[in-house]
Image (cartoon, helix red, strand yellow):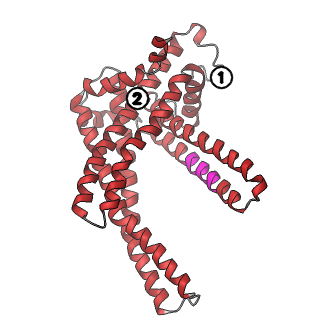
Amino acid sequence: MAAKTTSYFTFLKEALILSTRNPKLFTPVLLLFAVTAFLTSSVQVLFVQPFTDDLFSHLSHVIEIKSTDLSTYEYAEHLEAIKQDAVIVVPELIIALALGLVVQILAFFAASTTYSGDRYSVAELVREMSKGSALKGPSITIAVVTALNLAWMGILVALVSVMMRGRPVVLSVQGLVFALAFLAFLCFTVLAVVSVAVSVSDDECRGVRALRRAWRLMTRVRRKEGLVLVLVAHLLPAVVNPAYGVALAYAKKSTAVALCVLAVYAFLSGAQQVFYLAATTVYYYEAMEIKEAAPCGYAKIPSAEGNV
C-alpha cells in the first residue's frame, strides 16, 4: 500500500529530474520566468498598490466631503491624479501579462521537447516553434481557457453579490454553492493548464478538444495523480507568496529592501512555475502512455474522435 501511494507522486520526481536533462534550455527559461515575475511584482508593489491606495483615498475623501458636484476643482484634481496613475499602470500590466504568456508557452515547449528526448538550446527551440503552425494550437487553447476562466470568475463574483444581498436564512445554502463553485474553479484552472500541455504535444488537438482530452485524462486515466497536481498547483504558490507580502510591507519604508526581497520572490516564483509546468507536461505524457498501453484503447473512454 505504501509503495502504491508513493507511485502517485513519481511524476513530480520526474518533473524535478526533467530540467537537469537539458540545463542549457531550462536555465534561460527559469531566468525568463524570474525576470517576468520580478517586473510584474515590481509594478504591482511600486505602482499598482500605491495607485489602489490613492484611488481609495480619493474616493473616501470625496465621500467624506459629500461632494456630488462633478465640476468642483477638488473632484477634478482627484480624477486627474487617478488618470495619471492609470496611464502608467495599465500598459505595464498588459506588457507583463503578454510577456508571461510567451514565457509560459516557451516553458511548455521546453518541457515537452526535453521529455521527448530532444536537447534544444533556447535559440534552437524558438526556431523549431516558429516552423509551421506549432504555436497555433496552444494559442487557440489559451484563448479558450482564458475566456472560460473569466466567465467562471464572473460567476463567482455574481454569487458573492447574491450572498451580500441574501437573507440570513439562505446564506448557508448560498455559501455552500459558492464554496463548491470556487473548488470547481480551482480544479478548472489546473485542467486548463493540462489542456495547454495537450496542445503543445499535439498541435492538431486544440481549444475545446484539448479541454475534453485533459478532462478525460484527469478524471478517468490518472485521477489520483490529477488530484496531486491540483494540490501542487495551489499549495506551492502559498509557500512562495509570503515573500511578496514582505516586499509589500517594506515598499513604503525602503524601496531598496523591497526590491531585494522581490528579487528573491521572483527567483522562487520562477522555479515554482518551471516545476509546475514540467509536472503538468510529465503528467500528460505518462497519462497518455497509460491510456495507449491499456487493452482496447482504454475502453473506459468512449469517444467519437478516435483518440482522446
Q: Which residue is mark 1?
A: 304
Residue farthest along the right direction in this orientation:
169
- Circle 1: element type: loop
Instruction: Say if residue 170 shows up in the picture.
Output: yes
Residue 151 in the figure: left or right of residue 111: right
Q: Label 1 crowding class (10 Å Cα cut-off): few <14, some 14-19, many 20+?
A: few
- Prevailing SS of the magenta stretch: helix
106 falls in the magenta region: no
The image shows residue 282, relative to residue 272, as above or below, that is: above
Looking at the rendered structure, the kind of residue marked 1 is Ala
- In which quarter of the view is residue 106 placed? top left
Give residue 194's position: percent from left, percent from top.
49, 32
Looking at the rendered structure, the kind of residue marked 2 is Ala
Residue farthest along the front direction in this orientation:
168
Which span is picked out in magenta? 147-157
Decide which of tag 1 and tag 2 comes sooner along the chain: 2
